[in-house]
Image (cartoon, rainbow, N blue to C red):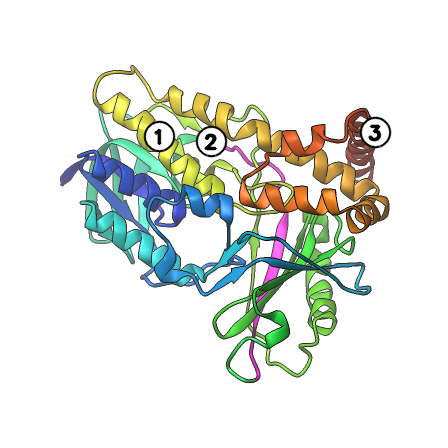
């Protein structure tokens, strides 16, 4: 049985980021994933500018489109477009980006094993033990980057996500094999149609990725929403391929993401943005924070891994909390919020600054001054209405 300093289950952005940083620091790292790479992953594949800046390596080799324009609509009505002077989103596909990141971690020194299904995880004793088809391994620290309800979270008894939203997406190939000119450099957002979420159309190298998401109770209507979006974006004649659904796990406040020698990162920790459903930024950040805490622990500078959870509380959870407030206020009063955004250049600019990282949710909301009290009231009413309907 091979002994490692750190074993990481899941080679998505969070797992590969942690593996890369730890390997760069000299740790002996095992990175495993149940899928054979390159593999696809349900995800819109839009890397926001603020996420792009947090990536452990330059993502240029896997970027397919750079987005500066957004096409908005409300409840499948008329479009209006807005252009920002900076790149907002870097479009990629997860089978390309995740494979690239795993390769970078491997080049940094990590041992990468794909097609490796975890059969058992043991956390008792002086090391974590992972059993898989080809054998087993031990590690001083175990990082769970295997999504919500992953093997590491189950073994550690960690349940950071209670009620995850849901999403459904599909790909629509371009008729001429290239993105139509009027969609080049533009993504689309459909607001107000889905309770707790929105619809989107993201242009890739050879297809549109169209999807929708919302609170769990919207799950039974997602196919209907997707069909409506297909027509809304003029894609009825295009074949619909690779239909897939997934969760958008957001951590419940105060839920543990560390236990003993195990910790959770990325989606496994429930660090998805509750307003946008975007999780790549937090995946990169939590992977980095985990590597820093693990390095201190392995070097004997910290008695445990709790500094990681403290860092997540400090660097990620405040913004997630403000994003939850904005989500709940918007979905309680979607039309007034949309009309304010449509008419106000300052609000559209501020929303784009959220995507680029020039603003955080706190500064975005505080610009409303006394009206923030109204937003808080709307958010509270929205939460109460959802609880009473449950």
Q: Is residue 113 magenta?
A: no
**Quadrant of residue 336 within the rendered picture:** top right
Tell me the SS state at disc 3.
helix
Is residue 160 covered in magenta?
Answer: yes
The residue drawn where x is 45% and y is 65% is 64
C-alpha gap between disc 1 and disc 2: 10 Å
Marks 3,2: beta carbons within 8 A: no
The answer to whether 81 is drawn above or below residue 258 in the figure is below
Looking at the picture, does residue 169 appear above or below residue 84? below
- The residue at which mark 2 appears reads as 158
Whether the residues at callouts 1 and 3 have beta carbons within 8 Å, the answer is no
Return the x and y of residue 327 as percentages of the image width and height.
Answer: 71, 40
Q: To which residue does mark 3 refer?
A: 374
In this rendering, the label closer to the viewer, 3 or 2 = 3
Q: Is residue 202 left or right of residue 325?
A: left
- Where is residue 286? Give x, y as percent: 42, 35
- Residues 278 and 64: in front is 64
Distance between the alpha carbons at the discs numbered 1 and 3:
41 Å
Which residue is at 49% across, 75% downward? Answer: 206
Label 2 residue SS: loop
- Highlighted range, magenta: 158-175
Report the residue marked by disc 1.
Answer: 262
């Amino acid at each position: 049985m091979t002994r490692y300093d750190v074993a990481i289950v899941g080679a998505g952005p969070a797992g590969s980021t942690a593996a890369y940083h730890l390997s760069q620091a000299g740790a002996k790292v095992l990175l495993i994933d149940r899928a054979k790479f390159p593999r696809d992953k349900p995800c819109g594949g839009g890397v926001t500018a603020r996420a792009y800046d947090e990536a452990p390596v330059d993502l240029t080799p896997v970027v397919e489109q750079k987005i500066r324009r957004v096409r908005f609509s409300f409840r499948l009505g008329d479009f209006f477009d807005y252009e920002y002077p900076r790149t907002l989103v870097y479009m990629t596909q997860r089978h390309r980006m995740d494979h690239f990141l795993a390769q970078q971690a491997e080049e940094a020194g990590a041992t990468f094993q794909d097609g490796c299904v975890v059969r058992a995880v043991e956390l008792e004793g002086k090391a974590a033990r992972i059993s898989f088809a080809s054998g087993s391994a031990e590690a001083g620290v175990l990082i769970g980057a295997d999504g919500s309800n992953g093997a590491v979270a189950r073994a550690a008894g960690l349940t950071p996500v209670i009620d995850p939203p849901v999403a459904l997406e599909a790909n629509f190939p371009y008729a001429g094999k290239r993105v139509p000119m009027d969609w080049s450099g533009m993504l689309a957002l459909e607001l107000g149609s889905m309770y707790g979420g929105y619809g989107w159309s993201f242009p890739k190298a050879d297809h549109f990725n169209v999807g929708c998401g919302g609170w769990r109770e919207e799950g039974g209507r997602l196919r209907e929403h997707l069909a409506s979006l297909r027509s809304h974006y003029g894609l009825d004649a295009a074949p619909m391929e690779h239909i897939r659904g997934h969760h958008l796990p957001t951590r419940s406040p105060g839920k543990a993401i560390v236990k003993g020698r195990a910790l959770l990162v990325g989606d496994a920790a429930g660090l998805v943005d509750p307003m946008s459903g975007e999780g790549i930024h937090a995946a990169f950040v939590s992977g980095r924070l985990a590597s820093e805490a693990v390095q201190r622990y392995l070097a004997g500078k910290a008695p445990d891994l709790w500094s990681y959870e403290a860092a997540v509380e400090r660097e990620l959870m405040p913004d997630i909390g403000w994003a939850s407030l904005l989500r709940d206020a918007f979905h309680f009063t979607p039309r007034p919020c949309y009309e304010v955004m449509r008419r106000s250049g300052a609000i559209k600019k501020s929303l784009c600054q959220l995507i680029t990282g020039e603003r955080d949710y706190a500064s975005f909301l505080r610009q409303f001054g006394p009206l923030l009290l109204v937003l808080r009231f709307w958010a509270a009413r929205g939460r109460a209405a959802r609880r009473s309907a449950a």
